[in-house]
Image: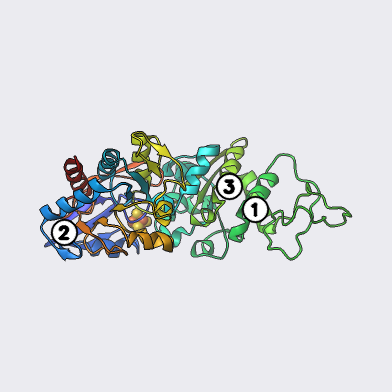
Amino acid sequence: MQTFTSVGCTVCGCVCDDLTVTVDRGRVTGARGACKLAEPWFLAQNTSSSPAVLLDGQPAEPEAAFARAAEILRTARYPLIYGLSRSTTEGQRAAVALADRLGATIDTTASTGHAPSIVALQQVGESTCTLGEGKNRADLVVFWGSDPVVTHPRHMERYSVDPIGRWLPGGRADRFVVVVDEEETETAKRADLFVQVPSARNWDALWTLRMLVRPTPPGPLASCEGEPPTGSPCDPLLPGKGEEEPNPLTPFAPSPALSELAGRITAARCGMFFFGAGLTRGKLAHRTVEALLQLVSELNDRGRFYARRMRRFGDVAGADSVLAWQTGYPFGVNLSRGYPRYNPGEFTGPNVLARGEPDACLLVGSETVADFPPAALEHLRKIPVIALDSSGAEPPVPTAVRFTTAVYGIHRPGTAYRMDEVPIPLRVLLPTDYPSDADVLNELLKRVG
Ligand code: SF4
């Protein structure tokens, strides 16, 4: 039996790197420090199980699979490369090189997650910091549209709520924790304050907060009869209480909880806003995230305030980073003209598939494909799909060629980026005969000519 310490976990964007993993006869037998998401994942890892290669669903020789995959990619007029968040820097770099050679469109799983946040920060900038700085300084922690107890189980313990920080020697006791969400989540149950805001009213609530925390207090308040108590401008054409005429400039009644949040913000020395999927849904989600980023930037007039995206998958932050340093853009990049073009919506994977544009697709990890809109999934079923997936993963669409690849951080070393873009080295725990994503992609690069 072997014991490995300081093991990194890539199941979620926290990329915790303090696990102790025991291995016995080609299997992971224990994972100390792993959360309820990570433990079953580690225990399911072994040296091998799935066939290395499937051609049209049948086991085949690797040579035949590479030849078929290269042929599909070489003859495609509009190839799409999608995924990358279960890979590492090495695999992501190889995927960009292949996309460049093919003149393909390349996109990451950000387009099913934080794409609106990326668009927003490109518009208004971002006041941000590492998780370490937040842990050491933030005496106010706000989770907006995010439920880390469920999605990032060790986030609160390691980075945001419980740990002792350099300027927070009392740990949890020195922090005030707020959850803003549409319903009381598991995280809200552990918070000091819960502010209920329907997801469609997040923008309104954020703008109301911006008004409430300004040094000049708002004017007389009007009520929002019959509206959810968000403190949002329900309808600017409705007259406020005691007014005869509609007044579009009338400020609106914030809920008591939202007012308390404003008070906590003005009293805080340092605040950290973690925002998640609850803020990135809907067609105008980028405007909502812009409002949060602007609020946080403005708050730096009175103290230190930071915003941080709660990234979902292990290395989605790395996928954005690698694409950005290789092409200049973080996701949704088209290379068909020999230079990178970026346009979310026009070149993002789910959108191009829903419009039926690609005639071949290479999935580097298929874990988010099930989240695609039905039209995109339908088109994927009509075109040849090449998938690189770990042993046991099942793509939700039929594949022409499927390569089983090694898992970074289990079978292969690599670098994954935590949600705050801090690179974390990954260790090898088990031997395997499977190639890595980078090995397969580099071999395809050689073969497509
Ligand atoms: S919080 Fe995330 S990275 Fe940390 S152990 Fe759990 S699943 Fe792994």
Decide: few, some or many residues near mark 2? Use Cα within 10 Å; few <14, some 14-19, many ≥20: many
The local secondary structure at tag 1 comes to helix
User: What residue sits 52% from the left and 64% below the top?
Assistant: 185
Estimate the x, y position of residue 347 in percent, counting from the top left: 42, 46
Q: Marks 2 and 3, how far apart in space?
A: 44 Å
Three-letter amino acid code at disc 2? Val
Q: On the image, which quarter does residue 153 sit in? A: bottom left
Q: Is residue 203 left or right of residue 352?
A: right
Q: Nearer the viewer, mark 1 or mark 2?
A: 2
> Can you tell me which quadrant of the image ligand 1 is in?
bottom left
Estimate the x, y position of residue 334 in percent, counting from the top left: 38, 41
Three-letter amino acid code at disc 1? Ala
Q: Is residue 157 left or right of residue 60?
A: right
Q: Is residue 49 visible?
A: no
Which quarter of the rendered picture does the N terminus lie within? bottom left
Q: Name the mark on residue 53.
A: 2
Q: Is residue 221 left or right of residue 338?
A: right
The one of 366 and 181 positioned closer to us in this rendering: 366
Q: Which residue is mark 3?
A: 287
Q: Count up the numbered dots.
A: 3
User: What residue sits 41% from the left and 54% below the top?
Assistant: 350
Q: Nearer the viewer, mark 2 or mark 3?
A: 2
Q: Which residue is mark 1?
A: 205
Mark found first going from the N terminus, 1 or 3: 1
Q: Is residue 340 visible?
A: yes
Q: Marks 1 and 3, how far apart in space?
A: 13 Å
Which quarter of the rendered picture does the C terminus lie within? top left
Estimate the x, y position of residue 63 in percent, counting from the top left: 11, 52
Q: Marks 1 and 2, how far apart in space?
A: 51 Å
Q: Nearer the viewer, mark 1 or mark 3?
A: 3
The one of 415 and 236 positioned closer to us in this rendering: 236
Three-letter amino acid code at disc 3? Arg
